[in-house]
Image (cartoon, rainbow, N blue to C red):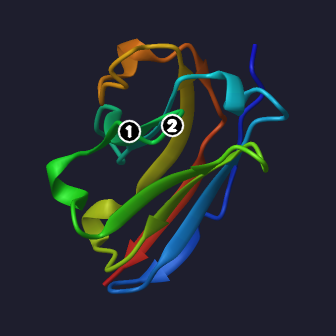
Amino acid sequence: QVPLVESGGGPVQTGGSLRLSCAGSGHISRMNCMGWFRQPPGKERQGVATISRGGDIIQYTESVKGRFTVSRDSAKDTVYLQMNSLKPEDTAIYYCAAGDSFTCPLGDFGYSDWGQGTQVTVSS
């Protein structure tokens, strides 16, 4: 089991920014795909952004394109999600996940290891 630990969540006002981090204790650099997912209150978990080890595959769900940026730092064994222009509908528990898929899909079926999640609350 890969220990993934998210941080950086919290309350923020509409239009604000947050940067989420996911630390992997040495394992992230060996996993091909890292993904950020979120589960809004009362809704199913959904893919937000994914990135391959080399960064040649990066995907975003439509609703965050142009506002969120995913990146990974192999030296720090950390994956980031920079979230700008936040909206109330971005309120959710955000999870990072790791997997060895070749395509780094936005569906959670491609990921075997998950963090505990960090809460992001955007107020209007």
Asked if the residues shown at circle 2 and circle 1 are in contact, with their CB atoms under 8 angstroms apart, the answer is yes
Provide residue 121's location: percent of width, then percent of height.
Answer: 46, 67
Q: Residue at x 40, y 61 (%)?
A: 69
Q: Quadrant of residue 63?
A: bottom left
At label 2, which amino acid type do we have? Answer: Gly
Provide residue 107's location: percent of width, then percent of height.
Answer: 30, 23
Task: Check the picture and name the quadrant holding the C terminus.
Answer: bottom left
Is 22 placed left or right of 42 in the picture? right
Q: Residue at x 76, y 36 (%)?
A: 24
Image: 63 above or below 77: below
Q: Nearer the viewer, residue 92 or 114?
A: 114
The residue under label 1 is 56
Q: Nearer the viewer, residue 19 or 43?
A: 19
Is 36 placed left or right of 41 in the picture? right
Q: Residue at x 76, y 26 (%)?
A: 27
Q: Nearer the viewer, residue 45 or 3?
A: 3
The residue under label 2 is 54
